[in-house]
Amino acid sequence: MSFTAERVTATIGAVLEGVSLATCSDDEFESVSEALHEHQVVFVRGAHLTPDEQLSVARRLGTPSIYPLARLRGVTEPALQSIEDGPDSPPTAEIWHTDVSWTETPPGYAVLCGVTIPPYGGDTLWASMFEAYDELSAPIRTLVDGLVGEHTTESIVESILQRGKGSPEAHATVERLHAAYPQVLTHPIVRTHPVSGRRALFLGGQSLRRIRGLAARESDALLGMLRAHVADERFQCRWRWQEGDVAIWDERSTMHRAAADHFPQRRHVRRVEVDGDRPYFDPAVGTRPAAA
């Protein structure tokens, strides 16, 4: 590599130094991709990508996504999503999640640029779902392998109605959402990564409501345990943003959350996602030695 990759923690994350995401060669970007798959999330300080450059980086990873709600509004070309917190728009991404798991093919990657960063607070955290799976005890791994989770659009409907204050336009958006996307969708609780073959926990976020085939109390207990498990700091890295920073992460093997400790200060970031594939579980690959 013509650049260096310095680990953020022993488990996940690396800072890439000496690379220009906007102008690097195809060979250099292939090395960026390799670092991404090794570290799951990579950061470049002070890249200051323009919107067009950010979309170009996404295209080098695959096909930039059209956000589902934007598609409902008739958008036909990929565009950046502007995420802005402030006094009148409190942050809403403080829970651990992967993006839009209520769709059949959730994103494969995401590229996030820091535009306006508050003087303090507003960090983003990522957690490795490879390590979270590997650190489960052997009996729990046996239990969760092959289980199926039910993801619903309930949380996104609640968000639409809340942001739209229950207006007729908000209800019309909900109707279009229900017509375009299944209200209940299943994904494996453990997914096999299509590049590495490793197994990763796949818990989505608020959209994952229950585990199919279990009684409600059993599902709640198991999901509660898994969600508490993935919040273990051993699996995490935390990024303190500066304006112009870029983060690129593998959506298929991580969860992330945005700390809300900057509110009511203004925080503005731009995101674009890259199309992924349908999550699957392959019982023949991806096993690791049992946790001690």
Image (tube, rainbow, N blue to C red):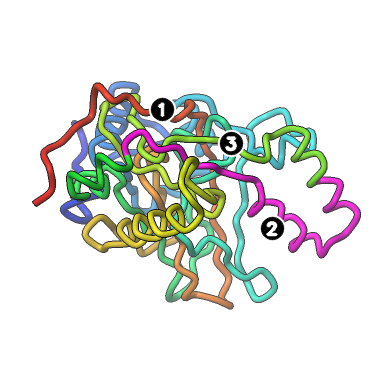
Whether residue 213 sits left or right of residue 35 in the image: it is: right
Image location of residue 109, percent across then percent down: 44, 36
Q: Amino acid at mark 1?
A: Tyr
Look at the image and give the residue range highlighted in magenta: 145-173
Numbered tag placed on residue 110 in the rendering: none
Q: Amino acid at mark 2?
A: Ser
Whether residue 229 sits left or right of residue 57 in the image: it is: left
Q: Residues within 10 Å of mark 1 (few under 14, many from 20)?
A: some
- Cα–Cα gap, marks 3 and 2: 19 Å
Q: Taking the image as drawn, is residue 15 in sight? A: no
Q: Residue under circle 2?
A: 159
Residue at image coords 23%, 37%:
38
- Whether the residues at callouts 3 and 2 have beta carbons within 8 Å, the answer is no
Q: Residue under circle 3?
A: 185
Q: Earlier in the sequence, mark 3 or mark 2?
A: 2
- Cα–Cα gap, marks 1 and 3: 13 Å
Q: Residue under circle 1?
A: 280
**Does dot 3 land on a helix, a strand or a loop?**
strand
Quadrant in which residue 143 is drawn? top left
